[in-house]
Amino acid sequence: MQDYEKPQGAGMDEENAPVQRSVLSQDIKIKGDLISKGHVEVHGFLEGKVNAEKITVTKTGVIKGNLKAESIEIIGTVDGKITCVSLTLRSSAVVQADTEYADLRIEAGAQLDGNFSKPKTLAAPKATKS
């Protein structure tokens, strides 16, 4: 699922750069696309596309647009399209989206509206040995 664009770093060795977490605070409102190699955590409002390794929409977070990541966790609100391998919808999630996923977890109380599909082209998470 690594078809997102890798951001260019000025003079940075991208192969050895640590993956960072980007946090959009509750008081931030953004219109535009966001691309990250790491974890994007949204506490505020974002209108546009988000493409990252991992996306978390917190309880105060609102995204109107498309999300694409290996792993997405929604606790807040999303209105758009979701494409991911692993999707977790927490009890306070409000989702209005067409969704493609390989692995889906939904807690009781989550509000959902849209089409959900599990295409064969998305890889399922690898099982771990206990």
Image: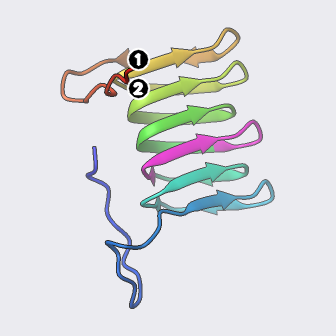
The residue sitting at the top extreme is: 108
Q: Is residue 114 visible?
A: no
Q: Amino acid at mark 2?
A: Thr
Q: Is residue 55 left or right of residue 92?
A: left
Image-based side of 26 in relation to 50, left or right = right
Callout 2–callout 1 Cβ contact below 8 Å: yes
* Mark 1, residue position: 115
Q: What SS does tag 2 mark?
A: strand
Quadrant for the N terminus, please: top left
Q: Is residue 27 visible?
A: yes
Q: CA distance from mark 2 to mark 1?
A: 6 Å
Where 46 sits versus 74, above or below?
below
Q: Position of residue 102 (x, y in %)?
A: 33, 23
Please give the label number shown on residue 99.
2
User: Where residue 88 appears, x then y in whole percent?
Assistant: 54, 25
Q: Which residues are magenta?
A: 50-62
Closer to the camera in the image, 72 or 67: 72
Q: Quadrant of residue 116?
A: top left
Q: Give the mark, 2 or 1, whose residue is nearer the N terminus.
A: 2
At 31% from the left edge and 27% from the top edge, which residue is drawn? 126
Residue at 47 percent across and 57 percent down: it is: 38
Name the outermost residue toward the bottom: 11
Looking at the image, residue 99 lies above or below residue 63: above
Residue at 58 percent of width and 26 percent of height: 95
Residue 114 in picture, x, y percent from top left: 47, 19
Q: What amino acid is at disc 1? A: Asn
